[in-house]
Image: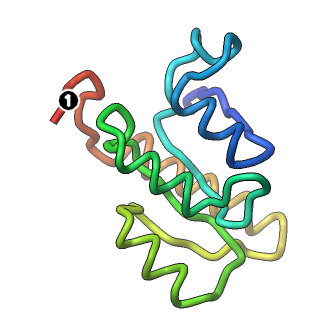
Amino acid sequence: MWSKKIIVAKDGEEALDVLFQRGEDNKTQRRPDLILLDLKLPKVDGLEVLRQVKSNSKTKQLPVIILTSSKEEKDVVESYCLGVNSYLRKPVDFEKFGEVVKQLSLYWLLLNEQPPWNIDY
């Protein structure tokens, strides 16, 4: 199988710092190949993170998957309006959650054809 580094942000503000390479710790890291985003984040909510990612020319091509417990129709609609690539509800069972993340990773990182990240459209 393949080996990828997983970066976990504790809140939306930290996620934005990682994605936009703000702060000394983040300047040397490359941007992630895939973003799994919860909507219910402290400090900056997931929809605002999505809004900023998809409105920036350096990050708008990154695939973003909402993986959340929200069942609100307005969250689904707004996520797609902002450019999310997929919206999934988290399984409550931890083993099922792990399997969902594994399947998502296989698809988005191995099977899905992504554009080169160094091109600005």
Depicted 3 relative to depicted 64: above or below: above
Secondary structure category for the residue under label 1 = loop
For image coordinates 54% across by 33% down, the residue present is 19
Q: Residues within 10 Å of mark 1 (few under 14, many from 20)?
A: few
Depicted 30 relative to depicted 105: above or below: above
Judge by depth and name the residue closer to the eye, 44 or 70: 44
Q: On the image, which quarter does residue 46 sit in?
A: bottom right
For image coordinates 46% across by 70% down, the residue present is 79
Question: How many labels were placed on the picture?
Answer: 1
In the rendered view of the protein, which quadrant contains the C terminus? top left
For image coordinates 44% across by 66% down, the residue present is 86
Q: Which residue is mark 1?
A: 120
The image position of residue 114, as x and y in percent, is 28, 40
Judge by depth and name the residue closer to the eye, 104 or 9: 9
In the rendered view of the protein, which quadrant contains the N terminus? top right
Residue 109 relative to residue 2: left or right:
left
The image position of residue 70, as x and y in percent, is 67, 80
Amino acid type shown at disc 1: Asp
Q: On the image, which quarter does residue 16 sit in?
A: top right
Toward the front, the furthest residue is 43
